[in-house]
Amino acid sequence: IAGFDEKMGFEDGKMITSAPGNDTVVVFDISNPRVPRITATLDLMNSLHGPPTNLIITSDEKLALVANPVDWIQKDGVWTNIPGHSLHIIDLEGTPKHLETIKAGNQPSGMDLTPDNKILLIGNRAEPTVSVIRISGKTAELIDTIAVTAPVDAVSVTPDGKRALFTMRTINSVGTLHISGRTVTFSEDENIPVGIEPYNVAVSPKGDIALV
């Protein structure tokens, strides 16, 4: 899947903005990597303010989830962004289709799924929280909002599904979430100071190291 933000562009070397209404999420069939094929083009608002971590496909390839980090408003005759709250749910079985859009946190951005595809964690860049989304079949529901130390840019779940690391760019730190079924907890004492402005995080397949 790929999201296309058609609201921003460049003209004479300067960034310009335009009215919303032309964004798309495109689903590709890459079973033949040499000849990828478009299987669906969905008219769904999304934004370059979240990539590369604001979309994900479940490991069983049945659902795609795409966060729209910002909404679009006109101010003094100029189109600009404000924090959004939307999470699009897309059915990938058969002909891909948009199932619903639910409300997540404030500027939902980096996200990751637990290995069983039952919990989606989303970092929120406009508030110090992580949204906990329960996935059941082809439905998604916001079940909890975890308060953390600072706004969150990216989340990465460990392979055993018991923990998640997340970046807090504004305080140069990585935090840890503990996951037990549908319960997610956070302790500020486990924050780890790292380099300047950590944006993304990835946990190794063995779960013994993480890169930030």
Image (cartoon, rainbow, N blue to C red):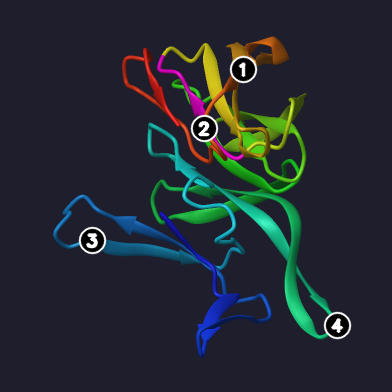
**Discs 3, 2 touching: Cβ within 8 Å:** no
Q: How far apart are marks 1 and 2 (CA)?
A: 20 Å
Q: Distance between the residues labelled 3 and 2?
A: 38 Å
- The residue drawn where x is 62% and y is 17% is 177
**Discs 4, 2 touching: Cβ within 8 Å:** no
Q: Give the numbered dot on residue 76.
A: 4
Circle 1 crowding by C-alpha within 10 Å: few under 14, some 14–19, many from 20: many
Circle 4 crowding by C-alpha within 10 Å: few under 14, some 14–19, many from 20: few
Instruction: Label 1: state its secondary structure.
Output: strand
Image location (x, y in percent) of residue 184: 67, 16
Q: Give the numbered dot on residue 195.
A: 2
Q: Earlier in the sequence, mark 3 or mark 4?
A: 3
Q: What stretch is highlighted in magenta?
A: 153-159
Image location (x, y in percent) of residue 5: 54, 68
The answer to whether residue 187 is visible is no
Front residue of this view, candidates 170 and 43: 170
Q: Give the numbered dot on residue 18.
A: none
Front residue of this view, candidates 174 and 161: 174
Q: Which amino acid does label 3 sit on?
A: Pro
Q: Which amino acid does label 4 sit on?
A: Asp
**Discs 1, 2 touching: Cβ within 8 Å:** no
Position of 158 with respect to 141 (left or right) is left
